[in-house]
Image: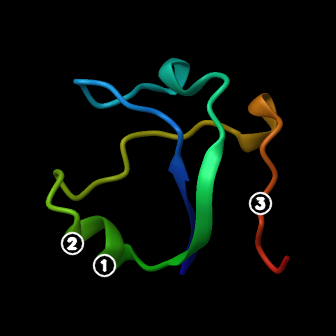
Amino acid sequence: MFLAGLMDWQGSLPPVAEDLIGCRTLYQGAAGIITIHKTGLEGKISGYRPLELDGISPDLLR
């Protein structure tokens, strides 16, 4: 399990970390790896951007 978040972002190409600057999460929740696989969108994690760079904090256990 991991914490997943739906970002307030849209674009015609998959995002890179810099595309997410200033975005916030619309929804956060626990997810499993099968969640990535079932999206049908290449089934992979494409990168990592530290939440604290944009003032985002995990909603876990709130």
Q: Secondary structure at mark 2?
A: helix
Of residue 7 and residue 44, the one placed in the foreground of this image is 7
What residue appears at the point 22 percent right and 64 percent down from the top-left corner?
A: 39
In terms of sequence position, does the residue under pointer 3 or pointer 2 come before the other? 2
Whole-angstrom CA distance, mark 3 to mark 2, is: 23 Å
Dots 1 and 2: beta carbons under 8 Å?
yes
Dot 2 amino acid type: Lys
* Colour approach in the figure: rainbow
- Secondary element under disc 1, as helix, strand or loop, is helix
Three-letter amino acid code at disc 3? Pro
Could you tell me how far apart the alpha carbons at marks 1 and 2 are, in whole angstroms? 6 Å
Q: Residue 26 in the image: x percent, y percent? A: 60, 52
Question: For mark 3, what is the residue?
Answer: 58
Tell me the residue that label 1 is attached to.
34
The residue carrying mark 2 is 38
Q: Callout 1, which amino acid?
A: Ile
**Residue visible at 76% across and 31% down?**
54
Say which of 36 and 8 sits in front: 8
Q: Is residue 6 above or below residue 12?
A: below
Image quadrant in which the C terminus is located: bottom right
Relative horizontal placement of residue 31, taking residue 13 as reference (left or right): right
Residue 58 on image: x %, y %: 77, 60
**Front label number (3 vs 1):** 3
**Residue visible at 81% across and 38% down?**
52
